[in-house]
Amino acid sequence: MDFDTIAAIATAPGEAGIGIIRISGKDAIEIGDKIFKNKKQLSLKECEERKLNYGYIFDPKNGQKVDEVLAVYIKAPYTYTREDIVEINCHGGIIPVRRILEIVLENGARLAERGEFTKRAFLNGRIDLSQAEAVMDLISAKTDTSFNVSLNQLEGSISNEVKKLQNVLLSMLAHVEASIDFPEDDVEDLTYETLKEQGSFVLEKINKLLGTVYTGKILREGLKTVILGKPNVGKSSLLNAILRENRAIVTDIPGTTRDIIEEYVNIKGVPLKIIDTAGIRQTEDIVEKLGVDKAKELLGEADLVIAVFDTSKELTEEDYYIIDLIKDKTTIVLLNKSDLPSKIDEIDIKEHLPDKRIIHTSISKNEGIDKLEDIIEEMFLSSEVKITDSIIITNVRHRDQLLKAKSNIEDALNSLESNMPLDCIEVDIKGCWENLGEITGDTVGEDIIDKIFSEFCIGK
Ligand code: GDP
């Protein structure tokens, strides 16, 4: 495809060691040539391709030197976008990168839209849509595990599986067509049997992929975790103990009325997003601080609750209130301060929370935390879905397409079972094929493509 030439700053804004300006398109090398000279006064095109060339950027308007840089040009098609590419490494910092970008724009490039480099890689056929989406997931990954899963997807793990299924569906369609075109050949019985077999195979594979969605969601978003307990039971001690060893990333969420901080911790490959730690830090009771409704709302969103009780004290009304709140939640119960003489009525807790995992901890002595981590791993990385499995569905759009594909292939199988005419069945098989095609981008509309890339960052 023939596109205009685009340019953008590829590095994050702010002060840094280097900043990179990226140019892609048919005039990229020409533009680079106009503005770069090396020490021997050679222009970019006169330097070797695919080599970082030391030199300067000049403004062709007035011949003024702008910055000392390393510049490289790479000819299509072996580039990120499959177009000619120039990259200029200049001094990091807002001024040099902006100045150079301006000069590049004045000399024939257009400012790239969000994700436009990757969009071109897709439109030029270097990667498919699911791989392009993996690029963004790689950039925004918050834990090693989610990074690895995205890397797998970038290498085409989802695409390959989807293409395999699409091929089976194509072969099904070929059978259908043959039977419709040559009904007198008496191939119909055979066709129904073959279609059932192939259809069941496709359904089974789709179900297997859908079986990874929950793990995928956890990897993408983190397991929303709330630590709950009345004041002084050891919540912040627990949080600190977990963070000490596992802290991954801290992000502030701007625009919220309270200062909510999200902490990502990585527990044996399970990313936990601990919600509302600010509240916990102040060792105030979440329930008391936020009110009953807010506490319920918070718990409503939680994938996991860690409920902490103090074993050295008898259970109070507050404890019973918490027990009531967590009854229907996925909860791990910590009976903390097990180093002190026990006064708690454990039997009572077990009776109230019969299906919950209960562990004894002494957080101040660092005892029982390993056990907590083992249980989290066991609960959320179930044996059916191993992270090391190459294909995990982390993208909501992919999940939705798989659900549609599943419904279509199920319809086809039901129709086969009740010996419906083949042209009815053909519609469902085609539908399934198209649903899968939307994952890789084969059959996807322009509006969806635009929406996907608009969520990218600039310069990618
Ligand atoms: P929070 O109000 O629930 O956040 O509780 P903190 O984490 O602030 O702990 C309250 C007090 O209990 C602090 O003095 C901690 O040192 C102490 N504490 C926490 N865990 C244990 C434990 O396992 N054993 C003992 N003996 N004290 C603990």
Image (cartoon, rainbow, N blue to C red):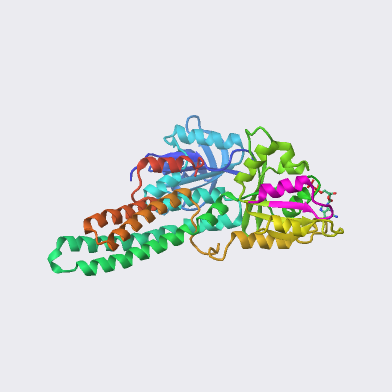
Q: Residue at x 22, y 56 (%)?
A: 423
Q: Is residue 131 above or below residue 115?
A: below
Residue stretch rendered in magenta on the structure = 306-327
In this rendering, position of residue 308 left or right of residue 96: right
For residue 312: magenta?
Answer: yes
Q: Quadrant of residue 173?
A: bottom left
Q: Nearer the viewer, residue 450 or 228?
A: 228
Report x, y in % for residue 49: 45, 52
Report x, y in % for residue 368: 76, 61
For residue 428: magenta?
Answer: no
Say whether residue 75 is visible: no
Q: Residue at x 48, y 60 (%)?
A: 391
Report x, y in % for residue 225: 65, 49
Q: Quadrant of residue 349?
A: bottom right
In this rendering, position of residue 315 left or right of residue 325: right
Q: Nearer the viewer, residue 244 or 194?
A: 194
Q: Is residue 406 above or below residue 88?
A: below
Q: Nearer the viewer, residue 258 or 109?
A: 258
Q: Residue at x 41, y 59 (%)?
A: 206
